[in-house]
Image (spheres, rainbow, N blue to C red):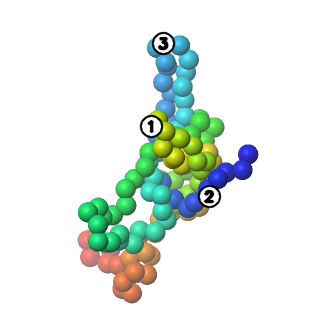
Amino acid sequence: MEADVRKKVIVLSANNYAINDKDTGKMNSGVSFTYLATDNLNPVTANTNTKGIKHSKASLPDTFKDVFVSVPAFYEMDFNIAPDKDGHAALKPVDARYIGVIKIMDAFAAATGKEAIPAGK
């Protein structure tokens, strides 16, 4: 099945879980994660009441528990568009692939034209 949307994101955290459902006795397992739906950390300063980038939470089946090899990092994700619990259209992750680490010092240098000074110097 082809995904509806493919996007580069920043995964901030990932947590493997296994929870026993008391009512059914079924084991629910997977990986939950928090991410930014962008790969661009430039400031968001539009003339609105909200500034910055809001994070999103999602989960994938436990077959993805080894995908999140390094966090925080860049990932490419496939999403399907599906209704959320309130019936609104929402992006639901269906696949994830590791791209690479976030190099904050390189991003700082690119944004400012200056070399970052490591802490303690």
Mark 1 closeness class: few <14, some 14–19, many ≥20 residues within 10 Å: few
Does 52 sit left or right of 61 as displayed? left
Classify the position of the N terminus by image quarter: top right
The image shows residue 53 at horizontal and vertical percentages of 37, 61
The image shows residue 23 at horizontal and vertical percentages of 48, 12
Res. 44 mark = none
Residue 66 visible (yes or no): no
Against 42, residue 21 (above or below) is above
Q: Nearer the viewer, mark 1 or mark 2?
A: 1
3 or 2: tag closer to the N-terminus:
2
3 or 1: tag closer to the N-terminus:
3
Res. 6 mark = 2
Marks 3 and 1, how far apart in space?
A: 24 Å
User: What amino acid type should be assigned to the residue bearing mark 3?
Assistant: Asp
Quarter of the view holding residue 6: bottom right
Does 51 sit left or right of 23 as displayed? left
Secondary structure, mark 2, is: strand
Q: Residue furthest bottom?
A: 113
Res. 86 mark = 1
Marks 1 and 2, how far apart in space?
A: 24 Å
Does 70 sit left or right of 49 as displayed? right
Mark 2 closeness class: few <14, some 14–19, many ≥20 residues within 10 Å: some
Secondary structure, mark 1, is: loop
Residue 63 visible (yes or no): yes
User: What amino acid type should be assigned to the residue bearing mark 1?
Assistant: Asp
**In this orientation, which residue lies closer to the viewer: 51 or 60?**
51
Q: Which residue is mark 3?
A: 23
Marks 3 and 2, how far apart in space?
A: 36 Å
